[in-house]
Amino acid sequence: MNKIENSFLNKNQFGDDFLWGVSTAAFQIEGAHDADGKGSSIWDVFTAQKGKVKNGHHALTACDFYNSYQNDIDLIRELNIPNFRFSISWTRIMPTGIHPVNQAGIDYYNKIIDSLLASGIEPWITLYHWDLPHVLETKGGWTNRESVTWFSEYVAVCAQHFGDRVKNWMVINEPSVFTGAGYFLGIHAPGKKGITNYLKAMHHVTLATAAGAKILRDKVQDANIGTTFSCTHIEPATQNQKDIDAAKRVDTLLNRTFIEPILGLGYPQADLPVLKKLNNYILADDLNNLAFDFDFIGLQCYTREVVKSSILIPYIGAELISAEKRNVISTDMGWEVYPPALYEVLKKFNEYKNIKKIIITENGAAFPDILTNGKVYDIKRTHYIQDHLEQILKAKKDGLNVEGYFVWSLTDNFEWAEGYNARFGLIHVDFDTQQRTIKHSGLWFKDFLS
Ligand code: GCO
């Protein structure tokens, strides 16, 4: 294979210690929804409800990673990718969310971990990537303060069984997304709505993030502990003060609300007054239990949002002007392709002086990928990745803290409410045959990492 020309970028420009990886999540790739004792998660239940997921798609099989993991790990190695981020399915480990432990679940993830290590690939575990056990949801899920205890016990089991070989951990994935979509808007599992559900989930998830991290620190020797946040560069639609203020409120909600408590700064209630309602759920010593000294923070930035003031939108008084309405280039998710967003987000999060290390734990794009004669020429995705790596280089040259980049995602997979319509993979999956085909972007990334 002659080297694919990547004239502007060279891995060495990022430094020898820069981390390169690829990210996935259990529910989106594994399938085997009830295999070997696995219990139902809220996403198993949600996808079974009519009308919740585009085209009625579900993840009963997904990418069948549960059975084809060795093939996919071989592909990770073929692509020269040294770090693999995956999540643990809580209901494989504890089918009802609490003890007893399902040994078959432990055995499965031991096989994944051992296969990765045997292949010279470093495992990076996300403990919670949205698939809460359904039994716990029947008890209120994240709106129930007991969720902190349930999650802590689950983390302890994973630390005990995997911590001898796995040193890189992320506690919770994108709390703003799954609480907002799942407990306020109702468009993601468990489909709950309303400000009370949202604020209770927000607080309990933030407590659980710190509690889980403390357990890892206690039980895993030499652990590199992080957690991940969705983040987006926010701009006002105009320089009208109302739009500037609206953008500041959206930025507070999307970029600050979940990270600032764990940095010991408390909830940014002054800049988003609705957050003062959290005081109804904050108990005396909670504020001391929200913070944790993470070894790294994972940022997951895909785009920017442009905001205008709107009296019609409760609690935030702002609305996002879609990429379509702004007539700009966008992905299959409707997200604007705007690489400078990554630089702006890195600049923003570098202002938090107690963030030790920033890793981009997700970045990627969904484009329509056509398989033609056994090839997928996804040049838009290749350019998307290259252009975002250029922004990381710019950030590093400006002295900003960014120590790694993980592509979302290894293979096309189940994109939540979008189902399989949004393809993010470096590797194409024919979901009828489970045939994998490395795309142009995957071949480029392989060359880039070689
Ligand atoms: C997220 C999740 C991933 C998504 C990816 C593309 O960031 O929303 O971590 O599960 O699939 O970001 O939307």
Image (cartoon, rainbow, N blue to C red):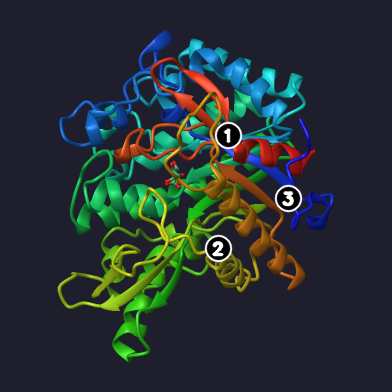
Task: Say which quadrant the C terminus sits in.
Answer: top right
| Amino acid type, label 1 | Lys
Residue 387: x and y in percent read 61, 59
Residue 6, label in figure: 3
Q: How far is mark 2 from mark 1, CA to CA?
A: 21 Å
* Residue displayed at 42% across by 61% down: 329
Q: Residues within 10 Å of mark 3 (few under 14, many from 20)?
A: some
* Residue displayed at 18% across by 50% down: 193
The number of callouts visible is 3
* Residue displayed at 42% across by 76% down: 235
Secondary structure of the residue carrying numbered label 3 = loop
Residue 66: x and y in percent read 49, 17
| Ligand 1 visible in quadrant | top left
| Amino acid type, label 2 | Pro
* Mark closer to the chain start, 2 or 3: 3
Asked whether, in this view, residue 206 is left or right of residue 11, the answer is: left
Frontmost residue, 11 versus 196? 11
State whether label 2 is within 8 Å of ligand 1.
Answer: no
* Mark closer to the chain start, 2 or 1: 2
Q: Residue tagged by mark 2?
A: 339
Q: Which of marks 2 and 3 is in front?
A: 3
Residue 280: x and y in percent read 26, 62
Asked whether, in this view, residue 239 is left or right of residue 183, the answer is: right
Secondary structure of the residue carrying numbered label 1 = loop
Task: Say which quadrant the N terminus sits in.
Answer: top right
Secondary structure of the residue carrying numbered label 2 = loop
Residue 299, label in figure: none
| Amino acid type, label 3 | Asn
Marks 3 & 1, CB-CB < 8 Å contact: no
Frontmost residue, 189 versus 371? 371
Q: Residue tagged by mark 1?
A: 439
